Amino acid sequence: MSKPLLRDVSQSQPDTSHAHQRDLPVGEAPHADAEMTRVLKTAPLHMASDPSNGVITFWRHDPLHDVVKPMVDHVIMAFPAEPVRFERRDGKVFVNGMTRPGTVTVIPAGSSSRWDIYQPLSVLQLYLPPTTLERVAHEAGTAASSNLVERTAHPDSITSRLLLSAGDALEGCATLDALFRHQLMDLLATRLLAAYAGSPVMFQPVMGGLAPKVLVRAIERLRSESDADVSLAALAADAGLSRFHFCRAFKESTGLSPHAWLRQHRLEQAMKMLRDTETSIVSVAAELGYSSQTAFAAAFRKLTGESPSDWRRHMR
């Protein structure tokens, strides 16, 4: 019997995407969130779901010794904390390495392998349906496969930072969180198509921003205090553009992504209320859509460096 191939993950890894496409009918493969719950034997600490585009989860799990079965979704992992030793076996391929910040693991849809992780591990995971990659590639006008190349603890600070930002930027405000997730899913899909689709994908540079009337309509929708739909899909549809092209054109016009623009607008609203009224901080948080005063205070401090109460005191 031939010995497994021992491969250091710091070195280049072969393209095994085709070898990992199993002959399992799609209807019989579980979604990634269900399979990961089975394997990790716990529930995620945080979970943000956009069922049509993807799911983001944050886990803290115990040592793991199990086979991850084929899933219908691609799984992309980033590691925010301590290095942990692991082994992955798949047929004759044996990968032995360490999870580290700045690395990512890509498990293509339909692939299966055995994992041995020897210590508790913190990990942020993205579950991305192949249809999301197909949509983003179509909107970007590129011909790209929805299959991804498998990578294990692969050095990639760009993708790692993007994915970890999901954990940092979920602020407890439903409108902001949803808009951020929509943008992040598309941005990560764009990055994965460029870096892990098996062949280089070229995206055309932005050519101009939104037409003035279209920009005004988008900003009016974002500013609306009613229950107007400010999802990325609604903003793009109103502009007559794909999500991909709307985000690029909006940033070209304003210098900010839709999420960053709305976050800045909400901050300005909060500052005005704190400075010019006697409205309590808990009421300010509720009026701006935050789930709690704590979530609002954390978001406010991240942008200003001060708590809402300290900022109010300094402004008076």
Image (cartoon, grey):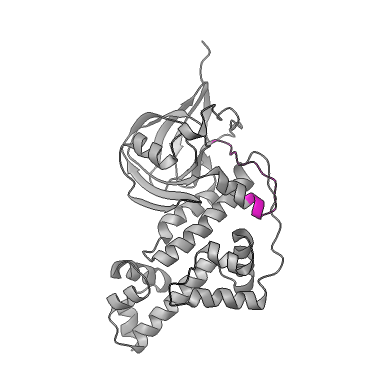
Residue at image position (69%, 63%) is: 206
* Quarter the C terminus occupies: bottom left
Residue at image position (53%, 78%) is: 220
Quarter where residue 151 is shown: top right
Q: Give 26 or 98, whichever is nearer the viewer.
A: 26
Give the image location of residue 45, x and y in percent.
Answer: 32, 49
Task: Please indicate whether residue 286 sits to the left or right of residue 131 in the image.
Answer: left
Quarter where residue 247 is shown: bottom right
Task: Please indicate whether residue 51 sits to the left or right of residue 211 in the image.
Answer: left
Residue at image position (56%, 70%) is: 256
Give the image location of residue 99, x and y in percent.
Answer: 44, 40
Measured along the vertical axis of the image, is residue 66 above or below residue 271? above
Give the image location of residue 6, x and y in percent.
Answer: 51, 24
Q: Is residue 146 magenta?
A: yes
Q: Is residue 307 at all visible to an observer of this figure?
A: no
Q: Is residue 101 at all visible to an observer of this figure?
A: yes
Give the image location of residue 218, x and y in percent.
Answer: 57, 73
Secondary structure character of the magenta stretch overall: loop
Measured along the vertical axis of the image, is residue 12 above or below residue 46? above
What residue occupies the far top of the structure in this picture? 1
Task: Please indicate whether residue 7 sits to the left or right of residue 202 in the image.
Answer: left
Residue at image position (50%, 64%) is: 231
What residue occupies the far front of the structure in this picture? 27
Q: Give 214 or 196, whichever is nearer the viewer.
A: 214
Q: Which residues are magenta?
A: 137-150
Q: Is residue 40 magenta?
A: no
Count of numbered circles in the view: 0
Q: Give 138 or 204, whichever is nearer the viewer.
A: 138
